[in-house]
Image (cartoon, grey):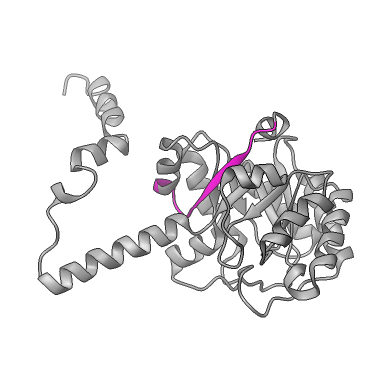
Amino acid sequence: MKKMLEKGEFIQAPGVYDALGARIVEASRFSAVYMTGYGTTASHFSFPDIGLLTMTEMVENAGRIASAVQIPLIADADTGYGNPINVVRTVKEYEKAGVAAIHIEDQVWPKKCGHMDGKKVIDCSEMVEKIKAAVDARQDENFLIIARTDALATDGFECAIERGQMFAEAGADILFIEAPTSREQVAEIPRLLTNKPLLLNLAPRTPNFSAQEMKEMGYSIALYPGICLMGAINGCTDEIRRLKETGKQRDFKDFMQTFVELNNFLGLQYYSSLEQRYKGNN
């Protein structure tokens, strides 16, 4: 991912919550994938995104996703799960899991989804120390630290920009101003923060933009955190409603993929070839 940024490539990273979603993203020829904390929390535990998951649970999911694909994985690491010492362990664990980049935010713990009400942020100096700890903890220089601030909602636009500047000085590789609420704010951020690549999170409170629009404004990365989660919820809801109303599920041939196509997508042919190779004389 670092090489892609250095080349000036615009990175679109659809949000997934499991390995299968990541495989679909990779098969669709996206250059990166994103593990959403909201989606992980909702899909694996049916919890709201209010800081109920631990670092271990998040890293375990990130590891499964990273092992399923070859494209870089950006992962949500919430607040780093504690003070700078905890951030050191968080970075090491995500790096061992095969993640390419993590974002750490300046909310108090327990945190809330960046597009919920009622957020609170820690003192800027405390977040600066977390970023320094994260940068020092990584073993691979290609592992990227994304510094996210939620201060726009709590302290206003100017404060968020100031924090972004301080996070850049602390060594963050990428800056992430969470939840701008207007086209004007989205456009203004790249004009004020020019020394680091910028990430835009296309979640509910932020206006929707095309990849070309974001690139022209000066962004380097776009996250689409809810795209797979909402697609799955809508699809499951429709199919369960159909079953309840009719008493019968749709025929498999009516789905987009046949059963054989699905199994092949999941790698059945590869494992069948291994079975043939190692069956011996039995």
Q: In which quarter of the image is the N terminus?
A: top right
Q: Nearer the viewer, residue 241 or 50?
A: 241
Task: Tell me where the magenta segment starts and ends, as one range.
Answer: 8-20
Q: Quadrant of the C terminus?
A: top left
State the image coordinates of residue 134 (x, y, percent, origin top left): 78, 50
Q: Can residue 219 be seen in this view?
A: no
Q: Tell me the residue at 22%/71% (across/down).
A: 241
Q: Which of 157 and 89 is in front in this view?
A: 157
Q: Nearer the viewer, residue 177 or 140?
A: 177
Q: Tell me the residue at 86%/58% (across/down).
A: 129
State the image coordinates of residue 82 (x, y, percent, origin top left): 74, 65
Taking 118 as reference, is 4 above or below it?
above
- Horizontal relation, residue 10 to residue 39: left or right: right
- Horizontal relation, residue 83 to residue 243: left or right: right
Is 13 magenta? The answer is: yes
State the image coordinates of residue 175 (x, y, percent, origin top left): 75, 51
Taking 7 as reference, is 147 above or below it?
below
- Horizontal relation, residue 178 to residue 261: left or right: right
Is 177 magenta? The answer is: no
